[in-house]
Amino acid sequence: MYRTFLSLLFLSVLAAGSYAQEKKYSNSIELSPQVSVGVFTANHKLTGTAYGGELLYHINTIDNPSQWMRSMRLKSIDLVFNYKNMSDIKLVDDPREGLFGDSYAVLAGLNVSLFKLNKTELLFSPAFGVGYAAKTFFTNGNPLIGSHTNFTSRAGLKIAAPLSPSTQLTAGIDILHYSNAAVRVPNNGMNTANVSLGIVQSIGKNTAPDSNKVSNFQHDKHSFDIGVNMGRRGVYQSKEGYFRTGLYAGYNFRLSSILALSSGVDAVYYHSVFDPNDFNRTYQSFATSYEHWRIGAALGPDIWMGRLALMMKYGYYLHYNSYRNNHTYWTAGMKYNVLDWAAVQAKIYIHKTEADFVGFGFLFTPLGH
């Protein structure tokens, strides 16, 4: 399980690491204390306030010659440490003290400039990575979190204004989510909406980027993918799990240096299926299947950042003998081209707002170059 979530973080920082080694111009450090204005989850009502903050290291990408960075108006690639004190959070229907432990996360993110007026700037700041929750169902009956290790994502808006040539003041709002992608169940997860006030300090000197080290990686306008992955879904209130194998075949149409439209067919093989005579152990909510195979067709965008791409698709099942009579699904994930024709991938399958499983594997692009 730990390798599963560390792999997510590894994929997210591959691109950041390569560009960090190229940069010789000014990076910066940011400290942003935070307080929640809302804490919520899908199936339970929560009260209380979470406190914490973020420590960020910004790898400066301004004026970088990479095409995808210029197209996205990327200001920095970020390495983020996030902390939340959850001691004040309680369930409305179970107001026990200390039910939720503190959370810690390490994330990789982006700082995208949306709008700039004089020297004041509006930034969009998504990030994702791996986190640790101190208390779980298996430690003290926490009904929302099934594992210490969790997938963590954050999306926010910030306003940055200069205090001096090397210092900025920031104010922002963001939503932080963590859950374990159903590796262990229960997996309701936790969401916090937060406001922050921070300070950014530049370090080092500004120098021009080295244009000789820019990656020229680019897929053809038309390409085809063949993929395979494998993952594990947890058994409810147990540390055991069921394995799935995912297969994919699809077509990609490149719209620009950062955007492609993809369509394809997903086939998922259940190594263990639903048994009505063993309901509590084999029931898997919207992912409950009477048969070993389910097949669907999906469409959605790929956002390319050099060799790293973020994927998202919405699909309809062509065949799925579902206990819950479910007809639609989502997939999302990342792929990183280690070769021009081969990528490693992490891909999550979702029904409505519920994670099914995360699969890790490979994508091949035999006709892409």
Image: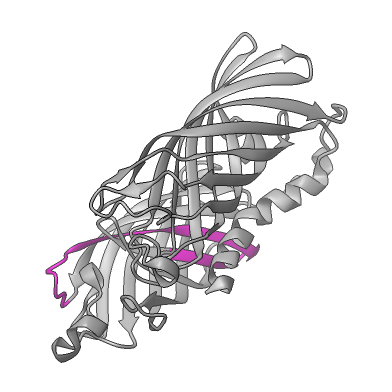
On screen, residue 237 versus residue 108, left or right, reads left
Vertical side of 293 occupied by 219: above or below? above
Q: Which residue is rendered at x = 64% and y = 44% of the image?
A: 80
**Image spot of residue 241 (x, y percent):** 39, 82
Q: Residue furthest front?
A: 97
Q: Which residue is outermost to the bottom? A: 277
- Residue extent of the magenta highlight: 321-347
10, 222: nearer the viewer: 10
Quadrant where the C terminus is found in the figure: bottom right
Give the quadrant of residue 206.
top right
Would residue 64 be visible to someone looking at this image?
yes
User: To which quarter of the image does residue 296 belong?
Assistant: bottom left
98 vs 76, nearest the viewer: 98
Left or right side of 321 for 269: right
Q: Residue furthest top?
A: 118
In percent of the image, x 53 and y 72: which residue is there?
Answer: 362
Relative depth, front residue between 238 and 349: 238
Image-based side of 90 in relation to 334, left or right: left
> Does residue 216 show up?
no
Magenta stretch: dominant SS? Answer: strand
Q: Position of residue 263 (x, y in %)?
A: 35, 58
Q: 329 above or below 86? A: below
